[in-house]
Amino acid sequence: MATIRGTNGRPVSGPLQGLTIVEMAALGPVPLAGQLLADLGANVVIIDRQSRTVNQAEINRRNKRSVALNLKNGEGLVAAKAIIAKADVLLEGFRPGVMEKLGIGPEPCLELNPSLIYGRMTGWGQDGPLAKVAGHDINYLALTGVLHAIGERGSPPPPPLNIAADYGGGAMFLVMGVLSAWIERSLSGVGQVVDVAMIEGVPAMMGLLYTLLSQQSWTEERADNMLDGGAPYYRCYETSDGKYLSVGAIEPQFFAELVKLSGLPESDCLIQNNKAHWPDMHARYEAHFRSRSRAEWVAIFEDSDACVAPVLTFAEARVHPHNVARNVFSNPDTCLQATPAPRFERTPLPPPRPAVAAGSDTVEVLAELGYSDSQLALLKASGALS
């Protein structure tokens, strides 16, 4: 496929320049994985089901191109296979069996393109008793044991947005998986299927907690441990103006700094990790931090090692001086979004291109594969282009 170029006509930079990815249009972790790879310079082409107008708020569609094909139409399927045949990676997030029914499961695609990395993203995995059962982030997280560990004692566990399973155990492991297979392909010359399941990705991130459990340093009770809100030095506190502070003073020297600057009793340093004192410390600290506004506390802890930071809204985070200095957020076309990350010294990432409309690049992509104007006209007339 042709090299993607920026508005200045130069090839888009980034360490993944030259990697071509086909992304089957879906929801959740696959679009994020495709966006992250596109941000790093990969040439990502979405195969959409239907053309539609652009929505700039769909951040996960930035830095990509799109073709709209009717995969139930024979010629549309042929066109999809032509795109896959030239790709390095395919990303799909359907239930097991859906891609096979469409005629573009792993077997025909790898026969067509033996070097293809076929990335599959599901919640439950491609097999097992629940493989074909519907579910969402909260369900996958629930079965890992992690959801049970989140929240207040005696209350139902709250959904931690869809960060933990969809994006942490899903999208990030899909990115890691296909890039690992791509590296291996440079040695073997052969592609492979990468089976990513959120129910496996989430536990893979829990090494520290499993260590603490095995050492009996972590209990199954919510809000009873160091990192789950049980410790008075690692939680959030309400301030007098109804806002919140995050406190994470784990190490003794940082806790001592917290105690000193906030005006708490120095004797608390002697009982920091004595769980018998935690209920009393919680009550005292709640009252203490509620005595001043968030801004007043921020000023008190400014430039200190007390490990205190204000809990910001999305709007506040966008304009925080540190985030501004690091250019953490960008706002092209008035749509708040994160600047591509991480940063690379020799292959810097360009500013993100706007979200792409479904089907906006159909003619261009197929022309790059050798389709003539007359062939494109016949595809359109047959209903293959949607």
Image (cartoon, rainbow, N blue to C red):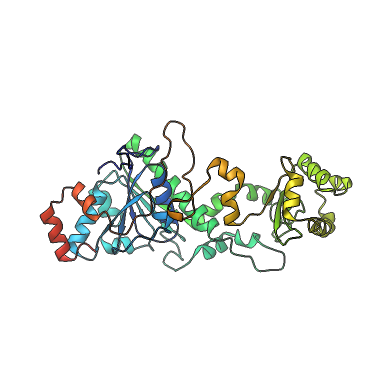
Give the number of callouts: 0
Using the image as rendered, state which of residue 214 and residue 271 is in the foreground: 271
Going 52% across and 57% down the picture, which residue do you hit?
165
The x and y percentages for residue 272 are: 81, 48
Using the image as rendered, state which of residue 360 and residue 143 is in the foreground: 360
The x and y percentages for residue 340 are: 46, 45
Q: Can residue 99 be seen here?
A: yes
- Which of the image's four quarters has the C terminus? bottom left
The x and y percentages for residue 247 are: 72, 50
**Quarter of the view holding residue 160:** bottom right
Going 60% across and 43% down the picture, which residue do you hit?
322
Going 32% across and 39% down the picture, which residue do you hit?
8
Q: Can residue 249 be seen here?
A: no
Question: Along the horizontal axis of the image, is 67 left or right of 200?
Answer: left
- Which of the image's four quarters has the N terminus? top left
The x and y percentages for residue 377 are: 13, 59
Using the image as rendered, state which of residue 266 and residue 316 is in the foreground: 316
The correct choice, above or below, for 305 with respect to 242 in the image is: above
The correct choice, above or below, for 74 with respect to 21 in the image is: below
The correct choice, above or below, for 63 with respect to 10 in the image is: below
**Quarter of the view holding residue 232:** bottom right
State the residue lying farthest toward the front.
334
